[in-house]
Amino acid sequence: MLVGAIVVVCLLLLVLGFLLPRLSRGPQRGVDRTLTTGQGIASKTPGPLGRLFAKPFGTSRRAADKSAATGRRARGKIDG
């Protein structure tokens, strides 16, 4: 279920980054803040489990950032 939600968020950020590059920064920051909070909470788990639980949040955050950047970059190639 969580994987599906991240895929949907990435697709939304990609489309938003392509259609409205400047306005896509706010939703990207919101996703970043949410996933960073989750990563911080998960990392407080003791021992190696903390790294294990925090890793999916960091990976998802990087994927969302990359998706939004790809949409803006594609838009830049069309306009420029």
Image: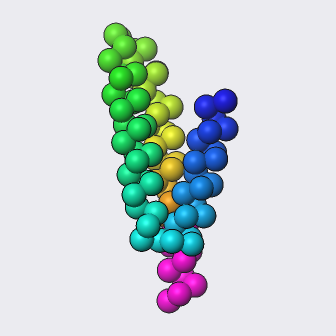
Q: Quadrant of residue 15?
A: bottom right
Q: Position of residue 28 (x, y in %)?
A: 44, 54
Q: Position of residue 67 (x, y in %)?
A: 54, 57
Most distant residue in the bottom direction: 80
Left or right: residue 2 versus residue 53 is right
As drawn, 8 above or below 37: below
Camera sees residue 2: yes
Residue in the image at 41% along x and 38% along y? 34
Residue in the image at 63% along x and 35% along y? 3
Q: Main secondary structure of the magenta part?
A: helix
As drawn, 63 above or below 41: below
Residue in the image at 58% along x and 48% along y? 9
| Numbered marks: total | 0
Q: Quadrant of the N terminus?
A: top right
Left or right: residue 6 versus residue 35 is right
Camera sees residue 70: no
Q: Look at the image and name its color scheme.
A: rainbow
As drawn, 21 above or below 38: below
Q: Which residues are magenta?
A: 71-80
Queried whether the magenta region covers residue 78, the answer comes back as yes
As drawn, 11 above or below 20: above
Queried whether the magenta region covers residue 1, the answer comes back as no
Q: Quadrant of residue 18?
A: bottom right
Residue in the image at 62% along x and 39% along y? 5
In this view, the residue in front, 52 or 4, is 4
